[in-house]
Image (cartoon, helix red, strand yellow):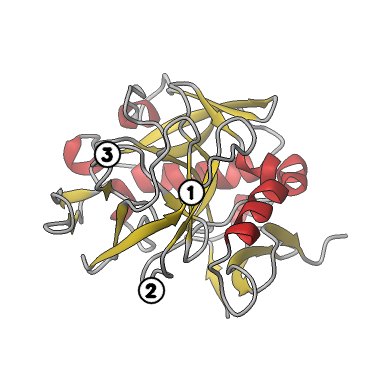
Amino acid sequence: YADTIPIIGGCGSLNSTDLSTQMAYEIDSRISGITASDTTKMLWSTRGNGTEGWMRSGTVWTALGTTPIDFTGASPWNNYSDYTLAGTLISPRHVVFTQHAPIINGSTIIFVDNENNIISRTIANIPQIQIGGDIQIAVLNEDVPSSIAYYPIIDLFTFQNYWKNVPNTPIIILDKEDKVLIKNASGIMMNLLYYLGFEISPRSDFNENIITGDSSNPVFGVIGGRLVLLSSVSTEIYGTFSSSFINDINSAMTTLGGGGIKFPHLTFLVLSHNLFRNLVWSQRLFPLLKIAQMGRK
């Protein structure tokens, strides 16, 4: 299927080919006028214990406005390490973790949809194969339902052409408390994405230090009201840049199996010529994870 997601608000000055401008707008427009507090940072109004008791917050800053951001594909809990060693879906059946903080085969992992329904799955296989600096892929025992999101990874060529001004681009990181933090993407070097705290309000108000136990939580950019997976937390200042290892990720997913009719479900983000006027998201059933650029001149 494919669905077209309009950019929040009018394009105006956003009708450019600069991902830094777009990603900044997506976050700044949402936190404008919002006072940072636990109430506006926490994903949950009631944080569950295991496979029950989860209720999403309506006051977290990413839930406000006309297009709430969908975190249903970010797992909040597993029975191996409770609220740590988080996993993030990149297909209905494949989860990305960090290699240095792995979960184990047979673990129960949960996802919570936007109606607070709890989806429980089992880690069917997580081979001890490291991708890049710190990426590991697991496969679930069965697909999650369509009420649970999964997140695309942008191909490296697109980032090199459209994300030309990486420093000071605001990005989202979840921590082990499931607070939605804002970090500064300070640079990409040697296949690592570096992130720091902002020093100027209001972005700085939504920052907290990354600490022990935050490893494996997702690092997201926001484009067209949707999350794209940039990395997972490896240290307090960097994570492996996922876009540098798309081929390796695809290879691992294909080897693990567990997709649609023949191959894993993978997501394309199709950029129109105007780039940010509309973003089209579509599912395909062949092994490739990238953004296809359409109508380029």
Viewer-side label of 2, 3: 3
Q: Name the image quarter holding residue 86.
A: top left
Q: Which mark is residue 145?
A: 2
Which residue is situated farthest in the right direction here? 297
Vertical arrangement, residue 159 with respect to residue 261, above or below: above
From the top left corner, tell me how far across and down residue 7 is, in percent.
Answer: 53, 61
Characterize the local packing of mark 2: few (<14), some (14-19) or many (20 or more) Cα atoms within 10 angstroms.
few
What crowding class fits label 3: few (fewer than 14 Cα within 10 Å), some (14-19), or many (20 or more)?
some
Position of the N terminus by quadrant: bottom right
Would you identify the image quadrant in which residue 204 lies?
top left
The secondary structure type at the circle numbered 2 is: loop
Residue at point 60%, 65% (across, down): 266
Q: Residue furthest top?
A: 199
Is residue 31 left or right of 279 when viewed as pictured?
left
Q: Nearer the viewer, residue 76 or 107?
A: 107
- Relative image position of residue 234 (x, y in whole percent): 48, 28
**C-alpha gap between disc 2 and disc 3:** 24 Å
Where does residue 14 sit, x and y in percent of width and height? 61, 51
For the residue pair 51 and 238, the one nearer the viewer reads as 51
Q: Earlier in the sequence, mark 1 or mark 2?
A: 1
Q: Callout 2, which amino acid?
A: Pro
- Within the image, what quadrant is residue 145 found in? bottom left
Residue holding disc 1: 126
Any mark on residue 81, and which? 3
Tag count: 3
Q: Secondary structure at mark 3?
A: loop
Which residue is pictured at 61% across the width and 69% down the height?
280
Amino acid type of the residue that numbered disc 1 sits on in the rendered structure:
Ile
Amino acid type for the residue under numbered disc 3? Ser
CA–CA distance in space, label 1 to label 2: 21 Å
Mark 1 and mark 3: span between their CA atoms?
15 Å
